[in-house]
Image (cartoon, rainbow, N blue to C red):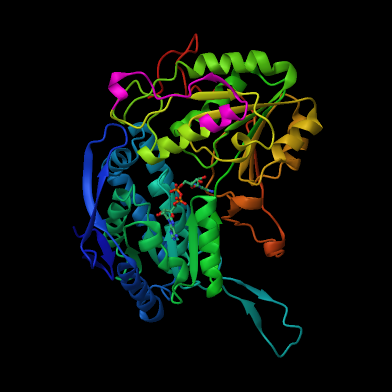
Amino acid sequence: MAEFFIDGEWAEPARGGTRQIHCPADGTLVGVVGEGTREDTGAAIAAARRAFDAGPWPSTPAGRRGDLLLRVAELLERDKDAYARAESLDTGKRLVESEYDLADVAACFRYFGKLAGQDAGRVVDAGSPDAFSRIVYEPVGVCGLITPWNYPLLQAAWKVAPALAAGNTFVLKPSELTPHTAILLMRTLTEAGLPAGVANLVLGAGPEAGAPLSEHPDVDLVSFTGGLATGRVIAANAAATVKKFALELGGKNPNVIFADADFETAVDYTLTAVFLHSGQVCSAGARLVVAEELHDRLVDEVVRRAERIRLGGPFDPDAETGPLISAAHLAKVEKYVQTAIAEGAILRTGGHRPDDERLAAGFFYAPTVLDGVRQGSHAVTEESFGPVLTVETFTDEEDAIRIANDTQYGLAGAVFTTDASRAQRVANRLRHGTVWINDYHPYLPQAEWGGFKQSGFGRELGPTGLGEYQEAKHIYQNLRPAPSGWFRAGHPSREEPMQ
Ligand code: NAD
C-alpha cells in the first residue's frame, strides 16, 4: 500500500488506512489504495517546503525546467495505453475519451514546457540614469493542488505543469474516487528526472487529507478545482494565512440557440454539450435556452436523439457515454430531477436508471430532458453534474442574454446563430469565462479558463497590467459549423458510433 509519494519516496499512510476503488461502470474492484490523514499531508507539505527552500528546483534555469516538462510529455505518450486504461477504470468513462484526455495531458505538459524559458522578465524605466530597474518572475513556493474526479489526470496536469514550469514545489491531493493516474504521474515525473521533494502525492478524503493544503502556514498557494461549496471552505481556510488561491468551481452553463441556427448543428451540439461524459463536465451545456419559435421542433428532435444514446462501460465499443461516478452522485442526480419535477418541470425523457440488465451493476442514468423549467427554480440555479438538460425559452436577443446571465455561476456558455453580428454581440454580453459560437466544448491550453462570478477564478494568462480588476473571457468561434457527430445514435445518416 505504498502509493503516497513523499520526498521522492513511496510511502504508506501513517495510520495504515485503506480505500477500495471500484469501477463505476460495473462495480469491479480496480485497486486498494492508502487512505491518508492530516498527518500524511503534513509530512508531504514539510517535504515540499524543504525542496522549495533548500532544493535545486526553484533556481534551476527556467529553460531546463521546461526541458523536463517536454520529457514528461514524451513519457506520457509512451505510456498512454496504461494511463488511459487506468483513467477509464477509475472513472468508468469510455476508453476512447480517456485517450483523448491523455493527448490533452501531454499537450499541456508540452505547452508549459515550451513556455517555461520564454519570458525572463523585463526592464522598466527607472526614471534616472543612475538606477536600473527590472521585473522578474519568481515561483510562489509550496503549492497545494486539489483536483476532482471528472477529468482526474487532466485537472492535475493543468495545475502540475504550470506549477513546475514556474519553479514551485507541490503536494497533489486528487479526488479520493480516482487516484490511479496521479500515482502513475509521480512515476513519470521521477523518471523524467524531477528532484526529490518537488512533487508529492497524498490520497484520501478532502476534509482529512485535503484540508491541510488550505490551512497549513507552510503552503503558499492552494489551487482547487471542484464544487462551489468546497471552494467556499477552501477560500475561508486560505484566508487565515492569506494564501494565494485559485478556484475553478462549478457552472450552470447556458446554451443559447436562435431560430436561424443551422438545425442539425444545433441539435448535435445540444446533445454533446450536456451528455458528453454523462454531464459530468464543469462546462456542460446543461441549460438549453432556445428561441420560442424553435422550441417545439428542436426539443422534439433532442428528445428523440437522447433516447437513442447508447450507454455502456469503458470497453464497450458501442457505448456513446458512460456511468456516473458513484452511488452517492447517482442519488444526487435522481434527487435533483425529482425536485425539478416537483417544482413543475415537464419530464420529456429519462428521469430514471436505464432498464437494461447489462448496466445494472453500474451507476448509469438515462439522458434526461426537463422542459418548461422556471427561471430561478432549483433546476436552473443548481448544478446536477449529470446527464440532465433543462429547457428555457426566450423571445428576443435581449431576453436571451438576460436569461443566460441569470445565474450565480459564470463558467461557460454558447450561442448558436447564423447571424455573424448577433453571434459577436451576444458573446460580448454573456458574463461567462468561455463563450463558444456555433460550437461547444473546445478547450485550448493557450487560452484563459476562468470563471466569472461564483465559478471562481482560474487561469488568467494574458497580462494586461490591470491584473485582478479585469476578467479574461475566451470567445471561440467555429467558422465552419457542422454537426460534430459525437452522439450518432438516432441520426438518420450517421448510425455508426464514433470510435
Ligand atoms: P468536490 O468539491 O466534492 O471535490 C473536489 C476535491 O476537493 C476532491 O479532491 C475532494 O477530496 C477535495 N475536498 C473536499 N473537501 C475538501 C476540504 N474541506 N478541503 C480540501 N479538499 C477538499 O468536487 P467533485 O465532486 O470532485 O467535482 C465536481 C465539481 O467540480 C463540480 O461542481 C464541477 O463543476 C467542478 N469542476 C470545475 C471545473 C472547472 O474547471 N471550473 C472542472 C472540473 C470540475
Q: Which residues are magenta?
A: 337-360
Q: Nearer the viewer, residue 232 or 377?
A: 377
The quarter of the picture where the N terminus appears is bottom left
Q: As drawn, which residue projects farthest toward the top?
A: 492
Q: Residue at x 69, y 21 (%)?
A: 261
Q: Is residue 79 above or below residue 191?
A: above
Residue 159 appears in the picture as rendered = yes
Q: Is residue 345 magenta?
A: yes
Residue 450 appears in the picture as rendered = no
Q: Is residue 250 above or below residue 493?
A: below
Q: Residue at x 72, y 64 (%)?
A: 466
Q: Nearer the viewer, residue 156 or 24?
A: 24
Q: As drawn, which residue projects farthest toward the bottom?
A: 130
The quarter of the picture where the C terminus appears is top left
Q: Give x and y (percent) for residue 329.
A: 42, 39
Q: Give x and y (percent) for residue 109.
A: 42, 53
Q: Give x and y (percent) for residue 42.
A: 34, 72
Q: As drawn, which residue projects farthest toward the left?
A: 1
Q: Residue at x 32, y 36 (%)?
A: 24
Q: Quadrant of residue 498?
A: top left
Q: Give x and y (percent) for residue 313.
A: 31, 29
Report the side of 467 relative to 116 (left or right). right
Q: Is residue 130 above or below residue 350?
A: below
